[in-house]
């Protein structure tokens, strides 16, 4: 089976998974390979398949099950027919998924098989293919790749092998093989290559794509791409990552987008309380995002996210309304926010806004600019001066973070009654709820 041309770091993954398989050599062994989109799950599965398939009576590798699932009618039956054909090399017409389960059990139960089910994104895709270990002979190995660890937990796999991003040295080598056809960057492009590697964050998909794209490019073109990535990323990378986002429910999408724009690096319980206050059921929502590999909880219980997933989320928001910034659901880019506030183009579409300025200078904006932002839930301002009537600020604010709050008192018409979190650190505040 054909795999990637440049297999940097691949051998280590293959050896670790094979070691897990060997632990269960006399039983039906199920191994799940779990990781975010573009992390190399399919490549690893193919390499394992190539290494061990000769030890089995029959074999099957069914690729991109999740995509296939959305395109084909009678999808359970088609997958069962594919499995039976691959193993037995005969074509079968399966009338129903129940009949298919019976055929799999009667025809495969005494055979030692190698089965790889790639790109699974829901349990329903598996229950009629490998829902019962008794359908297969002793020594059978079933390898599944997925972005959603709950699929593996429901199937009660023997082991879950989690794929992390590549380290810096392997990332540089993988990019270099695709861009220069050698293991190291050319000297004159070393700085630009490292900048690209930092942007990719150890994601093989991005390293391969950008390395191939930059192959045989001039130094000026490398510089141009490095600059472009900061403001206008490549959709070819995001299309692969966006599959995980598309599989979320609406509230989970809102939670993901809020974290992308405002809550990376924030403590989990703090974020949960704020988003619960917005009616988003964040206790379960954040758990789902973790299970799908879209966010991580790291040291001190802080929420973190791969930079490319963050950029993908922000691009989803920008893409929905590319030209009218005031109609986007969330605003985080300084120039966009300044433009909206100065031109009074904000609308009720805006749910969150984060404008962080330097303490050395103060920008002045009219509070009137917030008049139409009636659904604003999250407001973060650093060293921003608002003039005029604070009554124009949304009554729906749940989180108010205003570093360097400029007033000596909180105006009575500043609606904070629905706020769950108020942070006015480094402010000029002297009096509370009292007019001058």
Image (cartoon, rainbow, N blue to C red):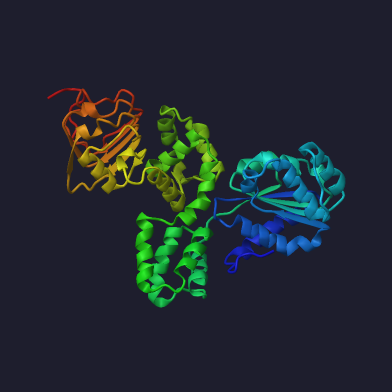
Q: Residue at x 28, y 36 (%)?
A: 346
Q: Nearer the viewer, residue 204 or 370?
A: 370
Q: Residue at x 67, y 62 (%)?
A: 47
| Residue 135 position (above or below residue 308) | above
| Residue 422 position (above or below residue 303) | above
Q: Position of residue 28 (x, y in %)?
A: 79, 48
* Left or right: 368, with 322 as reference point: left
Q: Position of residue 98 (x, y in %)?
A: 79, 36
Q: Residue at x 28, y 46 (%)?
A: 336
* Left or right: 12, with 142 as reference point: left
Q: Position of residue 46 (x, y in %)?
A: 67, 60
Q: Nearer the viewer, residue 202 or 106?
A: 106
* Left or right: 295, with 80 as reference point: left
For the question of whether residue 404 can be seen, the reply is: no
Q: Residue at x 72, y 55 (%)?
A: 61
Among the 4 quarters of the image, the one containing residue 379: top left
Q: Nearer the viewer, residue 88 or 313?
A: 88
For the question of whether residue 46 can be seen, the reply is: yes
| Residue 215 position (above or below residue 87) | below
Q: Position of residue 43 (x, y in %)?
A: 62, 60
Number of numbered labels in the structure image: 0
Q: Quadrant of the N terminus?
A: bottom right
Q: Quadrant of the C terminus?
A: top left
């Amino acid at each position: 089976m054909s795999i990637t041309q440049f297999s940097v770091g691949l051998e280590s993954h293959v050896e670790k998974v094979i070691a897990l398989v060997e632990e269960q050599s006399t039983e039906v062994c199920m191994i799940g390979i779990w990781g975010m989109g573009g992390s190399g799950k399919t490549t690893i599965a193919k390499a394992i398949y190539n290494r061990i398939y000769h030890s089995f009576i029959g074999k099957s590798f069914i690729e991109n099950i999740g995509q296939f699932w959305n395109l084909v009618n009678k999808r359970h039956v088609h997958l069962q027919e594919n499995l039976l054909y691959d193993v037995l090399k005969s074509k079968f017409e399966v009338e129903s998924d129940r009949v298919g389960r019976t055929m799999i059990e009667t025809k495969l139960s005494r055979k030692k098989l190698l089965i790889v089910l790639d790109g699974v994104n829901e349990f329903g895709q598996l229950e009629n293919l490998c829902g019962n270990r008794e359908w297969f002979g002793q020594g059978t190995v079933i390898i599944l790749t997925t972005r959603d660890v709950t699929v593996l937990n429901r199937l009660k796999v023997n082991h879950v092998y989690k794929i992390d991003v590549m380290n810096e040295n392997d990332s540089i080598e993988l990019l270099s093989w695709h861009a220069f056809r050698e293991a190291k960057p050319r000297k004159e492009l070393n700085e630009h290559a490292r900048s690209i590697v930092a942007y990719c964050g150890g994601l093989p998909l991005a390293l391969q794509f950008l390395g191939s794209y930059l192959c045989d490019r001039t130094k000026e073109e490398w510089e141009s791409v490095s600059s472009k990535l900061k403001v206008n990323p490549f959709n070819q990378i995001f299309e692969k990552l966006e599959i995980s986002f598309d599989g979320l429910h609406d509230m989970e999408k809102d939670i993901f987008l809020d974290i992308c724009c405002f809550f990376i690096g924030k403590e989990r319980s703090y974020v949960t309380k704020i988003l619960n206050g917005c009616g988003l059921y964040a206790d379960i929502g954040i758990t789902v995002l973790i299970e799908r590999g879209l966010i991580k909880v790291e040291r001190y219980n802080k929420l973190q996210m791969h930079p490319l997933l963050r950029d993908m989320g922000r691009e989803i928001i920008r893409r929905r309304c590319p030209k009218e910034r005031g109609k986007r659901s969330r605003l985080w880019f300084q120039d966009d926010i300044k433009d909206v506030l100065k031109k009074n183009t904000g609308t009720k579409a805006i749910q969150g806004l984060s404008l962080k300025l330097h303490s050395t200078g103060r920008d002045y904006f009219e509070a009137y600019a917030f008049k139409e932002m009636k659904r604003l839930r999250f407001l973060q301002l650093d060293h921003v001066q608002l003039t005029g009537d604070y009554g124009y600020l949304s009554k729906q604010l749940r989180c108010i973070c205003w570093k360097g709050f400029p007033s000596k008192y909180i105006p009575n018409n500043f609606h904070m009654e629905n706020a769950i979190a108020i942070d006015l650190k480094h402010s000029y505040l002297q009096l509370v709820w009292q007019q001058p």
